[in-house]
Amino acid sequence: MARRMAKPAVWKTAIYIRLSKEDSRDKSESESVANQRKICQDFIALQPDLGEYVEMVDDGFSGTSYENRPAFQKMLEGVKSGKINCVVTKDLSRFMRSYTDAGVFIEQVFPMLGVRFISILDIIDTFNKPEDLDSILIPIKNLLHDSYARDTSVKIRSVFKAKQQRGEYLGDYAPYGYLKAPDNCHKLVIDPETAPIVRQIFQWAYEDKAGLNTIVKLLNDAGITSPSHYRKQIGLITHENLLGNGKWQTFTVNRILSNEVYTGDTIR
């Protein structure tokens, strides 16, 4: 039987929001960060005992594991330190898609630490309705979410495989010497600015028998910008803290010489 936790003077609440890459691809408004935030905020506005809250958002993270979710880990730190004793989420699938992990947190970890867990759309509140912890409802829903996550993973791998078999390019960036076609992000087109540099690298390596260090020196002496800094120059990379000084390195040249894309094969 679930033991009723003591009510603290103030609930120190955290809203937890999660959106996976798969949700983003589907552009599902019902699962969007904005939608989850509004549902949680509207709920808390009607619950004066929840008071002020902090917001934890994992945008672009799978729910099948909690170890690699930075906001979830930050929330756990707050729970362990006593800064958070109430967790509110839109529904169980946003909190966790692993049946085992969800059960451990909701039925063991949170009760042991005196943490109230609220899943709004599932109508679960482990403080006001502690009997929910003894209900078969939570395990069944967690199992369904776990099964959905596994099914989705299989489907995504199947889609990727089908795209690869059709010769579509699935990488985040086009290889140096190529660009993604303006009308089809899975099709590569030759970049007139950098393709001659790639050809020159192959000529130096295979016709002139130049070593990696020699090729790097030739590129840097010619003032040619490295691939990553070139992508930033043309707006493909927007973040400010780009590593390196724009100079070529041996591992960059070696990666180009060993990349099968330059032989005409399409790889991810």
Image (cartoon, rainbow, N blue to C red):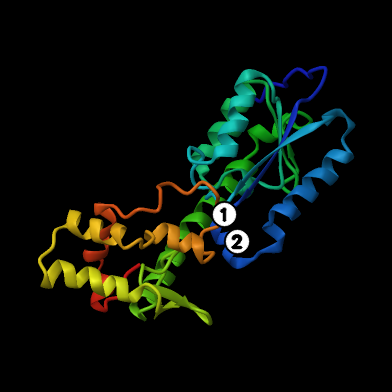
Q: Residue 137 appears at what percent x and percent y?
A: 64, 44
Q: Is residue 225 shown left or right of residue 18?
A: left
Q: Amino acid at mark 1?
A: Ser
Q: Is the residue marked by circle 1 packed among few (<14), some (14-19), or many (20+) residues within 10 Å?
A: some
Q: Is residue 245 shown left or right of residue 217?
A: right
Q: Which mark is residue 24?
A: 2
Q: Residue 114 appears at what percent x and percent y?
A: 67, 21
Q: Is residue 111 shown left or right of residue 152?
A: right
Provide the secondary structure element on which disc 2 rests: helix
- Contact? badges 2 and 1 (CB < 8 Å): yes
Q: How many marks?
A: 2
Whether residue 75 is situated above or below residue 190 in the rendered picture: above
Provide the secondary structure element on which disc 1 rests: loop
Q: Quadrant of the C terminus?
A: bottom left
Q: Which mark is residue 66?
A: none
Q: Is residue 236 shown left or right of residue 221?
A: right
Residue at 81%, 44% in the rendered image: 41
Is there any visible trace of residue 254 in the rendered image?
Answer: no
Is there any visible trace of residue 90 in the rendered image?
Answer: yes
Q: Is the residue marked by circle 2 packed among few (<14), some (14-19), or many (20+) residues within 10 Å?
A: some
The residue labelled by disc 1 is: 20
Q: Amino acid at mark 2?
A: Ser
Q: Quadrant of the N terminus?
A: top right
Residue at 78%, 44% in the rendered image: 40
Q: Looking at the image, which is closer to me, 93 or 180?
A: 180
